[in-house]
Image (spheres, grey):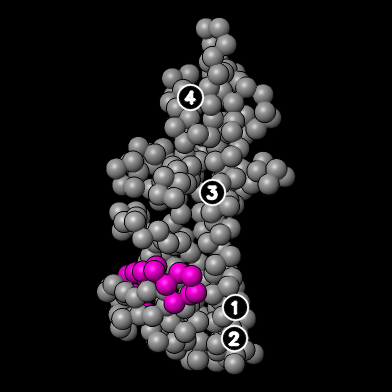
Amino acid sequence: MADRIEKRIELKAPVSRVWRALTDHREFGEWFRVQLEGPFVPGQISRGHITHPGYEHVKWEAVVQKMEPERLFSFTWHPYSVDPKIDYSQETPTLVEFRLERTATGTLLLLTESGFDKIPSERRAEAFRMNDGGWTEQMKNIQSYVAPKS
Amino acid sequence: MHAKRQAHASVFAALGDATRLALVAKLCCGQPRSIAQLTKGSKLTRQAITKHLRVLERADIVHSVRTGRESRFELDPEPMEEIKKYLDLVSEQWDQALSRLKSFVEG
């Protein structure tokens, strides 16, 4: 258990190909299953809707953060925001980062989604006042307790 | 689901503190403990420990049980299992998306 999700995947395709699949909004839409209204632009909101069967009513909204060609693409969003009645914009978003590394056979893609420990700002001050330890390190301790039971 | 998400956030936040995590560790044996027992061996005052216990209580990670004049605290592992499930769900969605990306760029 941690406050972040980390994935690494080897892709047998050149970095330039992977970069295009990630940052061209039409190509991103193909594999992510989302129809986007326009290109990704750093600092701007990307809007669209999910095309995944059964989730067509779900809106996609993210704020593009960084686009460093063939190296880093990142955005903030609200994961798993599938309930149309909820205004997820009131919640602190998580940060999704795609990092690309050239390998002998193609591309190593590192995905990180972080920020699950953030809470609505009105309660954050109180809850984080005494937080001085590393979250991930602390969660490891808990894991040993929860893991055998789940 | 909104209430649940808020609850996730408060569990994450409540556990994001070394003192509270140490309290959770002390309560992990399943035995309800008094504030005096939980303060023992800590540099913090009884009052400070109580404050931390209240934060854990608000996140439903611990419950207090009154026995006579004394409150005892016990751990409820469910909220921690809930956030693990939530992260697993988001994680699973990424696995699926990345596998589609793989077919897309390699195809």
- Mark 3 or 1 closer to N-term? 3
Q: Secondary structure at mark 3?
A: helix
What residue sits 46% from the left and 54% below the top? A116
Q: Which residues lie in the magenta part? A: A51-67
Give coordinates of residue B32: x percent, y percent. 62, 22
Give coordinates of residue B74: x percent, y percent. 59, 26
**CB atoms of marks 1 and 2 within 8 Å:** yes
**Above or below for A137 versus A50:** above
User: Residue B103 has which mark?
Assistant: 2
Indicate which label's residue lies in the foreground, 4 or 1: 1
Mark 3, Cα crowd under 10 Å, few <14 / some 14-19 / many 20+, is many
Which residue type does callout 3 highlight? Answer: Ile
Q: Chain of mark 1?
A: B
Which residue type does callout 1 highlight? Answer: Ser
Give the distance between the C-alpha atoms of the residues marked 2 and 3, in whole angstroms. Answer: 31 Å
Give the distance between the C-alpha atoms of the residues marked 1 and 2, in whole angstroms. Answer: 6 Å
Residue A132 visible (yes or no): no
**Above or below for B88 versus A135:** below
Judge whether residue A62 is colored magenta.
Answer: yes
Which residue type does callout 2 highlight? Answer: Ser
Which residue type does callout 4 highlight? Answer: Ile
> Where is mark 3, residue-wise?
B83
Q: Chain of mark 2?
A: B
Q: Are marks 3 and 1 on the same chain?
A: yes
